[in-house]
Image (cartoon, grey):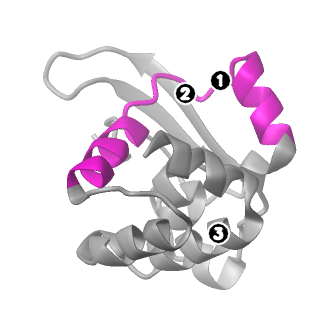
Amino acid sequence: MQAFIEKARSDSALMAKLDALGASGYGQEPNKIIALATEHGFAITEEDLRKAAETAGMQKSGELNEEELEAAAGGGTQNRYNPDVCGKYTEVEYDCVGFFRMCWCDHYRQKFVGANDDDGGRYHYICAMGRYDYIGNIFGDPL
C-alpha cells in the first residue's frame, strides 16, 4: 500500500484518478481503488485501504518535518479552493485534504493542540479562506 501511495504522489495522472474517486465517495466502493492499483501493478486489499485510511487520520501535527516539506514542494499541496463548493463548508471536507490526506489545500491548516484519552487528541482546524476555524478530533469532527 505504501508503494502505491508513493506512486500516486509522484504520478499526477494517477493522483487525479484517485482524487476523482475520493471526491465521489470512494469509501463506499473500495473495489474501484483496488482495480486502479492493480492497473498500475500494485496488489492491495480492502484491509490495506482501511489501515491506510486510519493512518491518514492519525497525523499529530499540521507542521511538516523536513522530508514532508520537501515532498510538499513537489506537489503535496495545491489550491483546491473553489468558492462555489467550499463556500458551503463549516468543517474539514475531502477537498481540504485530498485522497488519504495526501494533497492538502494550500488554505488548510491543522495543528495538534493536546492529547485526550477519550478522543485520540484535539486539533485546531482552520481554513485560511475563512470557511472554518474550530477544535476537532483526529478525524476532523468538531468537539
On the image, the x and y values in percent for residue 36 come to: 47, 73
Q: Which one is closest to the eye, mark 1 or mark 2?
A: 1
Look at the image and give the residue range highlighted in magenta: 47-73
Which comes sooner in the sequence, label 2 or label 3? 3
Q: Which one is closest to the eye, mark 2 or mark 3?
A: 3
User: Would residue 73 appear left or right of 90 to someone viewing this image?
Assistant: right
Res. 9 visible in picture? yes
* Residue 111 numbered tag: 2
Q: Residue at x 34, y 35 (%)?
A: 138
Q: Are marks 1 and 2 in contact (CB under 8 Å)?
A: yes
Q: Which one is closest to the eye, mark 3 or mark 1?
A: 3
Does the magenta segment cover residue 65?
Answer: yes
Q: Which residue is mark 3?
A: 14
Q: Quadrant of the C terminus?
A: top left
Q: Secondary structure at mark 2?
A: strand
Does the magenta segment cover residue 112?
Answer: no
Q: Residue at x 35, y 26 (%)?
A: 122
Circle 3 packing at 10 Å, graded few (<14), some (14-19), many (20+), is: some
Which comes sooner in the sequence, label 3 or label 1? 3
On the image, the x and y values in percent for residue 129 come to: 72, 58
Main secondary-structure element of the magenta-colored stretch: helix
Q: Secondary structure at mark 3?
A: helix
Q: Are marks 2 and 3 in contact (CB under 8 Å)?
A: no
- Where residue 80 sits, quadrant-wise, is bottom right
On the image, the x and y values in percent for residue 44 come to: 34, 56
Q: Residue at x 70, y 78 (%)?
A: 83
Q: Which residue is mark 1?
A: 63
